[in-house]
Image (tube, rainbow, N blue to C red):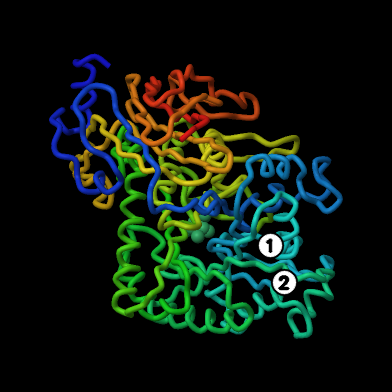
Amino acid sequence: MSDIDRRRFLASLGGGGALVAAGSLLETIGYAQASRGPARAFIQPSPVRADFDRRILGSFLEHLGRAIYTGVYEPGSRLADGKGYRTDVVREIKELGVSIVRYPGGNFVSGYNWLDGVGPKAQRPTVLDRAWNSLETNQFGTNEFVEWCRLVGTEPLLGMNFGTGTAEMAVAYAEYCNLDRGTKWSDLRKSHGYEQPHNVRYWCLGNEMDGPWQIGQLQARDYGRKARDVAKQMRVIDRGLQLIACGSSGTNMPTYLVWDREVLEECYDQVDGISLHAYYGNTRAWTGNSSARYLAMNLDMDRQIREVAAVCDYVQALRRSSKRLWLSFDEWNVWYRARSGQAVDGRRTAAPRLLEEVYNLEDALLVGGFINTLLRNADRVRVACLAQLVNVIAPLVTSETGVLRQTIYFPYAWALRYARGRVLDVRVEAETYPIAAAGLQADFARNDQVPFVDVVATHDAASGQAGVLMLNRDLDGDRELVLEWRDATPTRVLFCETLTGPDLTAVNTFDQPRRVAPQRLEPPAAGPRMTFRLPPRSYTAAQLTLTS
Ligand code: AHR
């Protein structure tokens, strides 16, 4: 980028081109400001980190729109197997290697009677789903979901109804799924043809119970007491269950952090994790429709993680507890277009087209940024779910004849394939740009300086391979990024591809399925010092062999 272009670019962001000291958030996530020139990333193994939990790369399937029906389950389709599961979707998800899938909601779960979805299909009732004003036929329920999880090689993460549901029925659900035999609910499962218990380990205690939109919304302390009660009873079924309390459903909630504190003051000792949710968009209110600001939004996710973790630690200290809670970022994605009116109203039909967000190139770049954020916070975030997986705000979209990979599929697939083992310590020195501007929503773009590049790296000791994921937020220019490896030396580049293009609004369609797709990027020679030339507005993945 020429100096004149740069000044114009910075001026367009409202910062006048002057660089000011980088804020403490950037320091926390390992960034320091540098002047013009290549960005440098100093990479070394962390003395304290363990392998990250692959559940951080999970996803989510809700009974919503076409996620289940015509998404993963479509009996009668020529693409379905004998049980009605879409084989093309199964193939895609197997290939992705999704680690864990949250189910059945979302808002849906707060009005869901799990008993309607088990037993002989002919006897299951069609009911009105009041969360999305849709018809729910219950032809796909918990047993089909767990069976489908086994088929695609993922782990189920089940949600419980804390809206219309009682504590008794929540615990009955866990008993139905996990108890071997000899009790009312375990024997019911067996009578439905599932001899072996499902052994579901991770459970969400409700969904977004702070939200006025939620069926059966609760006050924080009431929710916290109910979560405590259900958790205590669930421990009788299985002490080792991993239980996730509902945290705030967004940083923009008026009760953000207060909700989390009050809930945890009631149930800290009984739960293991707390949930975080966030959806982002390039809107006038958030970003002033600026793509440069938009590509910085993953730093807001860093902030949210830091703030909720601080509340957890505060309550831990109050309780003199030795237990440290982990975070479950169990809903995150870009979602701002298909978010109102017809896009969220099922008009009392089955499998309506709801929340069918069409993702463009800039959304994919930001999703890459979110993945970087999650990975660098993997010491605190144990579970995270890209919301969602098929058709509904999703990387995969089905038609009668096939399945399409949306733009956001690619960064997610790269993370699943190349981010393995331990997250390495990365200290970045990079030039920054300002994103402050008057009139933006207060919870984003306060006065931050944002680095042009965002980097994470992982190392898998078993295979000796490293993965590096690099976001270049510069809309106009290439950026050089020098990776300086400490303690280990790359000896071979196994893979290097980038997602970029001239048009940030480009999308994939069934007619043009590869308009936005990875391209090979010429990598530097392997060695202790490697200079990547990252194209403008790009997300790049590299896989290297490392020797120490
Ligand atoms: O993922 C779509 C919806 O977003 C979920 O149902 C809800 O939990 C959130 O508000």
Q: Which residue is mark 1?
A: 136
Which of 437/204 is in front?
204
As drawn, 337 above or below 519: below
- At 61% from the left and 67% from the top, the residue drawn is 201
Q: Can residue 122 be seen in the rendering of this structure?
A: yes
Is residue 211 among the parts visible in the rendering?
no
Q: Is 406 in front, or is 55?
A: 55
Name the residue at the right extreme: 82
In the rendered image, residue 363, in percent from the top left (x then y), is placed at 45, 36
| Residue drawn 53% across the image and 35% down it | 465
**x, y percentage for residue 410?**
55, 34
Residue 116, label in figure: 2
Where does residue 422 sit, x and y in percent of width and height? 47, 46
Compared to 394, does 206 lie above or below? below
Classify mark 2 as within 8 Å of ligand 1 or not, answering yes or no: no
Q: Residue at x 27, y 52 (%)?
A: 443
Spatial CA distance of label 2 from label 1 is 10 Å
In the picture as drawn, the residue positioned furthest to the front comes out as 548
Q: Report which quarter residue 194 is drawn in.
A: bottom right
Q: Residue 425, image x and y in percent?
A: 36, 43
Task: Name the element at disc 2.
Answer: helix
Q: Where is the N terminus found, in terms of image quarters?
A: top left
Q: Are marks 2 and 1 in contact (CB under 8 Å)?
A: yes
